[in-house]
Image (cartoon, rainbow, N blue to C red):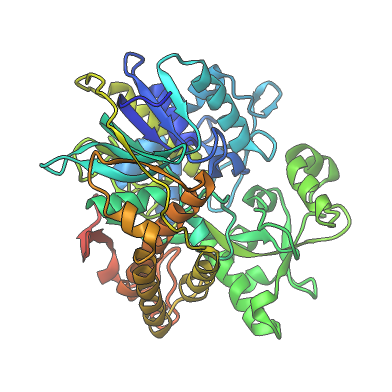
Amino acid sequence: MLQSAYDVLVVGAGAAGLYTALCLPSQYRVGLITKDSVARSASDWAQGGIAAVIDPQDSTDLHIADTLSAGAGLCDVDAVKFLVEHAADCIHNLVDLGVAFDRHHNQLALTLEAAHSRRRVLHAADTTGRAVVSVLAERVLERENIQTLDQTFVLDIWLDEQNRCQGVCLIHHSQVHWIRAQAVILATGGGGQVFAQTTNPAVSTGDGVAIAHRAGALLRDLEFVQFHPTALTKPGAPRFLISEAVRGEGAHLVDRTGHRFAFDYHPAGELAPRDVVSRAIFNHIQKTESDPASANVFLDLRPIPVETIQHRFPNIIQVCQKWGVDVFKEPIPVAPAAHYWMGGIGTDVENRTSIENLYAVGETASTGVHGANRLASNSLLECLVFGAQFRSLQLEPISAQTVAEIDSIADVEFTSIEQLRSALPRLVWQSAGISREQKTLESAIAQVELWQQEFSQLPLSQVLINLEPKKSLKLGISASDLRDWGELYNLLDVAHLILKSAQLRTESRGGHYRSDFPNTLEEWQVHTIVQEEKWSTAPIRH
């Protein structure tokens, strides 16, 4: 049963939210909020693994150097050191919790992924995220101090008169409630659904960034989106991610003629950084295909020993078979898709945002560890290392309060938003996808602003956007329709933020490529900052 107050509210139930909930001191009453159900998240889809220095032949200095190199000059060095130096402890804790990583001769097995100088990626076949999240979810459900709130959608942060976070406004069972908390932790993941082509699940609608922005929190580096080079492209199939580990094990990236074209663009070929490989595919398709919009290249697993494929990639084998591709006999058709958002809510290494009592962790946060381009398998690691910081969270416990009276509003007309929800990701993919330029960005920004105005005039928007604090409502609208409305509200904000950030940065760096400004410029070795409607830059923390 929903309570009127918790000590801590954690919003999001992927790896970051689950691990955070487990790390919070057990004396706190924790509400774990998920708009879907526990373990339906992008973390659950993560195939590759978790990077950590546990091999004597490896070193933290090497992992730090690889992370900084991938980040293209925008990583905060202290944050990267913090991430890498705490990695091994988090791995050992996961093993203690029951995560069954693959082993080789009774030692934790390690694989190589792109832009890593050593084999340091732990894995559980090709479903590492699922292996981690399923164990974390089991442990969360065992904890008496944690209440999971499924099918619950957070609308906005609840601020007090001093603009401190004092809770959230949420929708639970078609009712709007204001719930108090001493601390709110946003762990809502990324925003890949703002792009038409994405490896992210349907829940990844950028909710944390959007609600933090509306509350006035500082956001950072929102233009930096990582496009994974190799997503399955079959008619009717979801853009299923073909893990980077496949290329690490020896798969070849080829065009229709069988040519390994990636070496034409970078000496590391298939194992170049993700943004380089994605652009190589994009550019090669532009040069060689008559219809680039629907074209693809191929990932050939046949150079890998059959037994290695069977052992390491059973899920990839199964999904490809489902869509008519036999990986042992033919290459997989692939093309780039939006995969990971490096930017997010600005935080320090203790996960604090610019708003008191509001925290962010995981992909929704911008800690500075990924810079302009995330190193492979550092994302699950970030969820764990920064989630572990909440072990030392100090709060003044609050007493429960009476739930406010609920007004019934059953006659709000619900306007279908399917058309807008479909058009928005197509616009963002075309204008802020792998290649961007000024005129297209300007046109897209104007269109999104027009859509935002139209959305705000919907009858339901008029009620919910202008809702007074403590005003609870019972809405005569289904929970799924309310979630659709809320996700579009957030996606419109996220689209506008990404487009404006991409327009601001007049250079190319990491996951951000401007065809009209193709060079990386020293004067742009700065963070882009957004707070309310103010856009600026800030120096890198060294």
Q: Determine the residue positioned at 47% across, 76% down.
A: 431
Q: Determine the residue positioned at 50% across, 27% down.
A: 91
Most distant residue in the left direction = 162
* Picture coordinates of residue 514, whole percent (x, y): 42, 76
* Picture coordinates of residue 523, whole percent (x, y): 25, 70
How many numbered marks, from 0 up?
A: 0
Tell me if 529 is positioned left or right of 147 in this view. left
Q: Determine the residue positioned at 71% across, 69% down.
A: 297
Determine whether 264 is above or below 13 in the image: below
Determine whether 225 is above or below 131 in the image: below
Can I make out residue 85 in this image?
A: no
Residue 506 or residue 248, whichever sits in front: 506
* Picture coordinates of residue 349, whole percent (x, y): 29, 38
Quadrant containing the N terminus in the rendered view: top left
Tell me if 45 is positioned left or right of 425 in this view. right
Residue 430 or residue 224, whichever sits in front: 430
Can I make out residue 412 in this image?
A: yes
Most distant residue in the right direction = 329
* Picture coordinates of residue 393, whole percent (x, y): 27, 24
Q: Quadrant of residue 87?
A: top left
Q: Determine the residue positioned at 61% across, 44% down.
A: 112
Determine whether 333 is above or below 450 in the image: above
Q: Quadrant of residue 325?
A: bottom right
